[in-house]
Image (cartoon, rainbow, N blue to C red):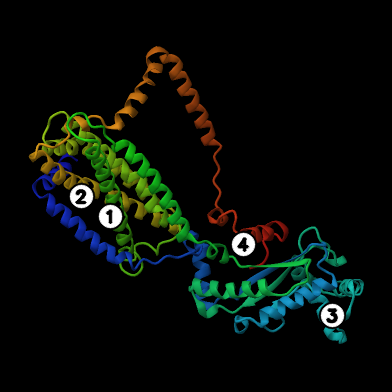
Amino acid sequence: MNQIVRAIAGMVMRAPWVVIGIVLLVTLGLGYFNSEQQQVTGNEGFSPDNEELTALERSGELFGSTDTVMQVIVESESGDVFSADAYRAATTLREAIQDSEAADRLAEQPGRDSVITWFAPVEQVAAAQGSDLLALDDEQLKDLYRQAYASLPDEQTGFVDPLVAEGGDIAEAEGGKALLLLFLDTADFGDDFAAITELQTTIVEAVDQAALPEDISADAFAFGLLFEEQDVAAEIARLFGIAALIILVVLMFVYSIRPRGDGSWLGAARRTVADVALTLGAIVIAITWTNGIGVLLGPDYLDVIGYFNPITQIIPILLIGLGVDYAIHLNSRYREEVSSGKGVGEGIRTALTTVGVALVLATVTTFVGFMTNLTNPLPALRDFGILASVGIVAAFLVLMTFVLAARFLLDRGAERRERLPRRSLASTQSKALPAAMSRTAVLAERIPFVTLGVTLLLAGLGAYGLTQLSTEFSFTDFIAEDEPILETYETLQSDFGGGFG
């Protein structure tokens, strides 16, 4: 470890401009690949590699894919989806779907229509009798429905029954919610998730625009739409902005200094802003490296990982927090050395050979921790572990080289002009934190047995809680709680036992 750190220190001291130039050139090169970054929004990254899925994929290759099923939940405020108005709503929805831009993708097979409603039994009877169901009132329609349902063979009732929500009685034509099913031919789309989702979105728009009776509502659903509805990029940008703002405030506090006779308030402010800017700039560079390397490791080049997904997109936020730690440790130790009277070069060398060794070990342990995700059966989490490990190493290298080389150049000039504010650097606000934390040592000094007992008690409670820990995985954990599509999905789960498809 010492040899690695000493080698880095030697490069920074002997050729700071070369170090900065190399970092910037690498950043430009990897920045080019950032523009080729592709992001996926489906659920395929969350599917574990197992024999069942492998067999499913193989059967699809050999025998072709089945039709894609979409479901439309129809709900009546009056609690009756077997009324004349409900039938008109079902008819309107079917016509809207058949007249939409997705009409040529509706899959009709022998013995099965492309659009099926919960009124299918009575429509069969009406077609045989030549009756016009739209001319019937509520009671006439219900009577005819009961007769039609009673005449169905068992294999058909098994298909029709799930079209009415739990709690309803389809045999008596009673219920407040029902399903309309439609089948889409997407066999030739293959793995083009975006094309399938676009087709499903067309159906959603057609359903939303259908003119239904006032007390009837309809919501279309397909599983892929759960992920398409998410504006992941905007959410990641928002979280990144919040994290950056918080870190900015923290750094301004930690890096701020007070002039003590060898500098002005303006100079102290300039020094604080410079250190904050160097740290944040280094983090941006580390993120650029991580994303560029991620593209090179992706399917278009080395094919080690997949395309970026919603989980890997949070890595920049992760790097803000982890990368700042390196900068604070190094900067604080460097200021301590310089304020004690050491030269700029010696201060940087000492900071690197002391704190730097600890940071190397911290980087290695963090790297190993993230790389354990290689054993995870979910591809998205494996990719996250790889990219997070790359990001940690990138942040370490950039902060150990670029930041210190830039600080060396800035402070060396000030030192030569005898303007380096050594006494002011000793006034850094970060000293307030150790002072506050040192007060907690009173507990260990005055009541050691009580402190140890409380610690063991809390550890015991934690250990017991660990034995009660249960893990569950649900795709809905990755969906924002206020998304309308999530409410539709939950309705399918609770009222229709998960629905079809």
Return the mark for residue 402: 2
Q: Amino acid at mark 1?
A: Ile
* Residue shown at the point (69%, 79%) measured from the top left: 96
Among the two numbered marks 4 and 2 on one chain, the one whose residue lies closer to the N terminus: 2
Q: Which residue is mark 3?
A: 134
What separation in Å lies between label 4 and label 1 (alpha carbons)?
37 Å
**Which label sits in the foreground, 3 or 2?**
2
Q: Among all residues in the image, which is located at the extreme top?
A: 446
Q: Nearer the viewer, residue 255 or 454?
A: 255
- The C terminus sits in image quarter: bottom right
What crowding class fits label 1: few (fewer than 14 Cα within 10 Å), some (14-19), or many (20 or more)? many
Q: Amino acid at mark 3?
A: Leu
The reply to whether callout 4 and callout 1 are in contact (CB within 8 Å) is: no
Q: Position of residue 135 (x, y in %)?
A: 88, 81
Return the mark for residue 485: 4
Q: Secondary structure at mark 4?
A: helix
Residue 204 image-quadrant placement: bottom right
What separation in Å lies between label 3 and label 4 (alpha carbons)?
31 Å
What crowding class fits label 2: few (fewer than 14 Cα within 10 Å), some (14-19), or many (20 or more)? many
Among the two numbered marks 4 and 1 on one chain, the one whose residue lies closer to the N terminus: 1
Q: Nearer the viewer, residue 474 or 270?
A: 270
The reply to whether callout 1 and callout 3 are in contact (CB within 8 Å) is: no
Residue 433 image-quadrant placement: top left
Q: Amino acid at mark 4?
A: Ile
What separation in Å lies between label 4 and label 2 (alpha carbons)?
46 Å
Among the two numbered marks 3 and 2 on one chain, the one whose residue lies closer to the N terminus: 3
